[in-house]
Amino acid sequence: MTTSRRTPWVEVLLAALPAALHALFFLGRLHPDELFQSLEIALNRTYGFGVVPWEWQVPANAATATQPWGIRNWSVPLLFSGVFRLGDALGISSVMGRRVLAEVPQFALHAAMLAAVWRLAARRVGPELARACLWLVALYGPLVWFGGRTMSESFSVAFLVWGLERLDAEDETPGQWLLGGALLGFAQVTRYGSAAAILPAMAWLLVSRRFKTFAWAAAGGLVIAFGLGLLDQLTWGEWFHSLIHYVRYNVTSGAAAASFGAQPWWTYFLRLLVAPFAVVGLLWWRGPGRPWLFIASAVGYFAIVSATAHKEDRFVYPTLVLLTVAGAPLFVAWAAQSWAGARRVVALGVAAAGVAFFVFPSPFDVQRKEQFQLVAKASVGATGLVIMNEGMWGSPGFFYLGQNLPWCPCDFPQEGCFQMAARDARFNRGLYWSNGNDDARDQSSELAFTQAGFRLVERRGAASYFER
């Protein structure tokens, strides 16, 4: 039994496995950024091939361009590029080999975040109940889905939780507060939108009169900020180029809302119900120990993103996790106070909702699992690939092909992409993605593959895989 406050690292590593295994076995993606803003751009940086999204492109008139460009920094792609080169040195160059290597730093970061969850809970409810908190958070539906993914939200939230936990510890040394500030700096570097969570947390330190903690945290953050500025200078040729252009695109110009749409301020409120530990723990527990730093960060972030015109479901993920981490110790303490009668039924129901909620359809669900799985399978022996009923940003890109092969996405057999692939013998792999609601289209598309000399090898979910 856990009786000390020493971090149980073996258990923490085991708790970090579900998210990593989910990402590796199911593949798919939560959003195109999971592929195109990390793995694909790292592939291009390393080998010279791979899709380069507009965020990474330098316009011909870069010196005089009025539109924002280069709105991402190179920290994550350079990390993965180093991982790919290490894999080459070790003889690991297959698609899944590279994907496993890319998961190693992600797994380490996820484990560090869960260790922070355990420490936070141990301070508030004791080491024994901290174990329950660790597993409730580790198996929380959204965290399992996001935790092993190469998404900016995944990296940033892990740094946020870890950094806030260090700043929450009032009895720690200034060095730990310095570390906490640096970790918040990394949260900002990996996702600029996380400033909306960091600023409320820093403000709370001032409100709660923890001036020394604030000063040391600010110092740690400034060190990372200097590193970001230097990175931008070395890669984009201008200090803080990516941050400046990101703010221009997403905040001051309104370009993001104009390009991707706007939604009303109340859009995210129902999403809060997806954090059952927070709902029960923060609302019903009357004892001491609320981690106000986490709550201030979560609520402040939620208010800011709700006020921002452009909205996506993934943007609310930081609030869900921060509230879950804050509420889990309180929920466990509430349940342990009287483990009998109606309270036991409610507690078991809430726990089940937290760890099993995402078994059901959800806007946070992982998409195109079967498609990515079959493209990874097709990478063995492939000399060319055509994907029908799929656009560029829904495709698995070059990464899941693993090599510089001709490939193209199209919607219908009569499009030039498919017609070219039908005549070009290099295209020996094909994949069709069904919308599931148009049998006539499915049949005509599969017939087009057959008439082009492809044979159906496997159906997996909505995906059909062809070879010739």
Image: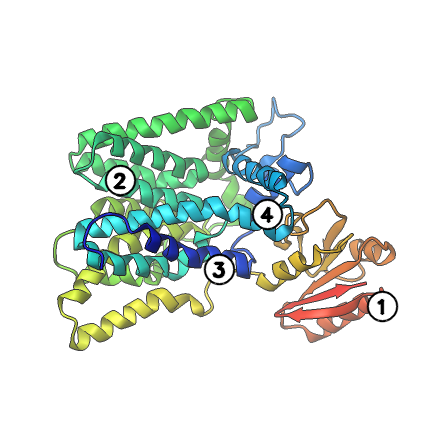
Q: Could you tell me the amino acid type at mark 3?
A: His
Answer with mark 2 or mark 1, whichever residue precedes in sequence.
2
Q: What residue would you read off at disc 1?
A: 451
Q: Which residue is depicted at the point 36% across and 26% down? A: 223
Q: Quadrant of the C terminus?
A: bottom right
Mark 3 or mark 1, which is nearer to you? 3
Q: Could you tell me the amino acid type at mark 4?
A: Arg
Contact between marks 1 and 4 (CB within 8 A): the answer is: no
Mark 2 or mark 1, which is nearer to you? 2
- State the residue in front, 306 or 290: 290
> Helix or strand or loop: what does disc 2 sit on?
helix
Q: Quadrant of the N terminus?
A: bottom left
Cα gap from disc 1 to disc 4, whole angstroms? 35 Å
> Helix or strand or loop: what does disc 1 sit on?
helix
Q: Which mark is residue 22?
A: 3
Q: What residue would you read off at disc 2?
A: 166
> Helix or strand or loop: what does disc 3 sit on?
helix
- State the residue in front, 447 or 217: 217
Cα gap from disc 2 to disc 4, whole angstroms? 33 Å
Mark 1 or mark 4, which is nearer to you? 4
Residue 57 as seen in the image, left or right of residue 320? right
Q: Could you tell me the amino acid type at mark 1?
A: Gln
Residue 217 as seen in the image, left or right of residue 72? left
Q: Which mark is residue 98?
A: 4
Cα gap from disc 3 to disc 1, whole angstroms? 37 Å
Contact between marks 3 and 4 (CB within 8 A): the answer is: no
Answer with mark 3 or mark 4, whichever residue precedes in sequence.
3
- Return the x and y of residue 43 as percentages of the image width and height: 63, 41
Q: Could you tell me the amino acid type at mark 2?
A: Arg
Q: Which residue is depicted at the point 20% across and 34% down? A: 206
- State the residue in front, 251 or 348: 348
- Return the x and y of residue 285 as percentages of the image width and height: 16, 60
